[in-house]
Image: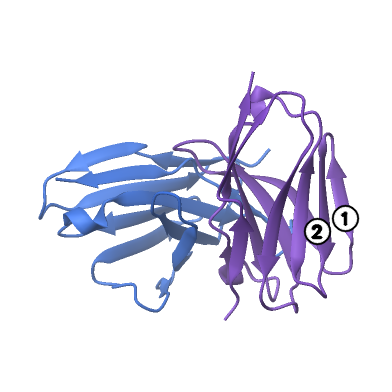
Amino acid sequence: KQEVTQIPAALSVPEGENLVLNCSFTDSAIYNLQWFRQDPGKGLTSLLLIQSSQREQTSGRLNASLDKSSGRSTLYIAASQPGDSATYLCAVSLSGSARQLTFGSGTQLTVLP
Amino acid sequence: GAVVSQHPSRVICKSGTSVKIECRSLDFQATTMFWYRQFPKQSLMLMATSNEGSKATYEQGVEKDKFLINHASLTLSTLTVTSAHPEDSSFYICSAMRPNSGANVLTFGAGSRLTVL
């Protein structure tokens, strides 16, 4: 059974810092991996999707990397802003089926002004 | 862009009553929608897959008679929590598959916070 772990559970940084969020998964035979953002009491917004054949994806100040062999992904946020404060979840799919998305429990990020 | 609307965003009910939560895809047709449950500081757990025009597929451990799912149209799925109890208090989120966007590219609703007194 696929397990997804995100460490740390919470992170607080001053504005302007670059930071890295970590995601690890136990079964390396994944189809793809996604990073989501969740604001308090809200649903999920997809940030980046990395296919199993890819090493990284970039969108603006966000860069996600994938190392399938080691079962790890990182989300790099450059020049953090208070508006980046949210919970970030990663989710892996073994087969490409939405039914088989396994989510991590998230990292709650607070960017202090 | 694709939008999924969930209603209500918050609901408080008494123990023993039933609560219905709606999930609508506003600008696309969704033959498949998903219902999740999320406890504080925990990950989303898939409860069931809602299929338009057919019975929902429930994940192991989810009581289908307690969590009734109806997907009567291509834009609406409903989750009814029957005879709700305090332990059913949780954040319920739906998602819908966007057509022609890949098998697991989902659009999520904003969630519904259920509090059972």
Residue at 64%, 48% (x, y): give it: A36
Q: Which label number is shown at residue A50?
A: 2
Marks 1 and 2 close (CB-CB < 8 Å):
yes
> Which residue position holds label 1?
A56
Q: Position of residue B60 (x, y in %)?
A: 40, 79
Q: Report the number of numbered marks.
A: 2
Q: In this view, does A104 lie to the left or right of A42?
A: right
Do the residues at discs 1 and 2 belong to one chain? Answer: yes
Which chain gets the purple colouring?
A: A
The foreground one among B49 and B60 is B60
Question: Which class describes the residues within 10 Å of circle 2: few (<14), some (14-19), or many (20+)?
Answer: many
The image quarter containing residue B66 is bottom left
Residue at 54%, 36% (x, y): give it: A39
Q: Where is residue A101 in the image (x, y as percent from the top left)?
A: 60, 66
Q: Is residue B115 left or right of residue B9?
A: left
Q: What residue type is labelled 1?
A: Glu
